[in-house]
Amino acid sequence: MIYQLLPESPKSGPNHRRRFGSKAYCVAITSIVLYVVFVVLTGKAAETNRDGTIGSLNDSTAKDVSSSLVTDQSNQVLGHVENIVLLGERHSGTNWITQHLQDCFGSNIEVTPHYTRFKHWFQREELYKGAPNSVVVVALFRDPFDWVWAMKERPHHAHDHIGLPWLEFVTKPWMGKRGPHDRNITQMPGMKETVTCFSQFSFVEVMPCSKEDSPKVVGHADYKYELLHDGSERAYSSIIDLRKEKIENHLSTSSYNATRAFYPFRYEDLESNGTDLLLSLLKETTGIEPQCRSSKPKGTVKHKEVPQEYVSWMNKYIDWNVEARIGYFPRE
Ligand SMILES: *[C@@H]1O[C@H](CO)[C@@H](O)[C@H](O)[C@H]1NC(C)=O
Ligand SMILES: *[C@@H]1O[C@H](CO)[C@@H](O)[C@H](O)[C@H]1NC(C)=O
Ligand SMILES: *[C@@H]1O[C@H](CO)[C@@H](O)[C@H](O)[C@H]1NC(C)=O
Ligand SMILES: *[C@@H]1O[C@H](CO)[C@@H](O)[C@H](O)[C@H]1NC(C)=O
């Protein structure tokens, strides 16, 4: 799998090369902090130019992606792109972009906020049953200062975090309570190990597990916390630890067998620059002409007004190495 940063920036920063198994991973954060990665599956670790990746298209065949075969330079057939998948945490613009991409591409290809699981949750490759190289992933990320603050203002699914002052919010372990149905599960021999919870999580990965223990709160959806996904049944000690692992997890979907192409975007760039770039990338990978108007650039995005102590706290405790992979940096 070849990753390529688009577009080339004349002032591009340092490149980091990593290897995940046999897949070459190349990331560059440009000085304009636009972070876009293009992925082509080739089965070989050779350099592949993206210009050579889409074959047998003509201007009028864009209607139906299944009419086009996508090949690499050696004409290895990659098969059809079957869907465009949106991933992203709560408050990261995923509703907006899902709706937008459904308007643009939805009459020709499935656009869905589900990959191996629903868009917000930890993804797990083994759960996906689709064909290899068939999914185009758009992963959205939001500025950490704005995102944590938005989660504080409205902690979707995280009912035990509603209404907390910021310091309590960011230092409270990311967990809820188990109810009577969950307790029953723990009391039945063998049940805890075999039961399946929402989104095919296991009992030790989420809290609560039982649907009956997961009431809805108006404006905050139902009650769901993800725990560490190491089987220990321990909770993240803070929302920022959840964020770090979620970023890593969503970035890792780029190397899934089913992933044909992977486009990470910052929410702020889509707002301020509009969606032309995103649409043209998707047009190129799927061969489908977008049937919509792109969202127009809105200029600079306003950040949330937050206390200086919060900024200092975030500067100190956020994992800035992971944030740098998606183009976010500490604030002055
Ligand atoms: C485009 O390709 C399709 C399938 O190969 C063909 O039927 C159609 O006539 C072509 N259209 C044009 C304008 O070349
Ligand atoms: C991905 O593909 C490789 C090579 O075909 C295979 O060995 C591996 O089991 C696949 N991984 C998953 C999670 O399906
Ligand atoms: C828990 O199990 C007991 C015994 O089987 C049963 O009587 C009770 O209704 C169960 N409670 C819930 C909430 O399912
Ligand atoms: C996207 O928006 C950011 C923030 O407004 C800006 O700095 C950057 O230059 C823009 N990138 C492109 C490619 O237009």
Image (spheres, grey):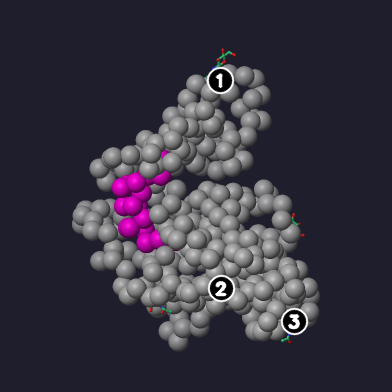
The residue located at (52%, 28%) in the rendering is 212
Image location (x, y in percent) of residue 235:
46, 38
Q: CA distance from mark 2 to mark 3?
A: 21 Å
Label 3 environment density (alpha carbons within 10 Å; few <14, some 14–19, many ≥20): few
Residue 184 has which mark?
1
In the rendered image of this protein, does residue 100 appear above or below residue 190? below
Image location (x, y in percent) of residue 245:
49, 52
Label 1 residue near ligand 3, CB within 8 Å: yes
Q: Nearer the viewer, residue 228 or 296?
A: 296
Residue 291 has which mark?
2
Residue holding disc 3 = 56
Q: Nearer the viewer, residue 322 or 149?
A: 149
Q: Is residue 36 left or right of residue 268?
A: right
Give the quadrant of ligand 4: bottom left
Label 1 environment density (alpha carbons within 10 Å; few <14, some 14–19, many ≥20): few
Image location (x, y in percent) of residue 199:
59, 42
Report the span colored magenta: 140-158
The image quarter containing residue 68 is bottom right
The residue located at (31%, 52%) in the rendering is 149
Residue 72 visible: no
Q: Amino acid at mark 2?
A: Gln
Secondary structure found at label 3? loop
Label 3 residue near ligand 1, CB within 8 Å: yes
The image quadrant where one finds the N terminus is bottom right
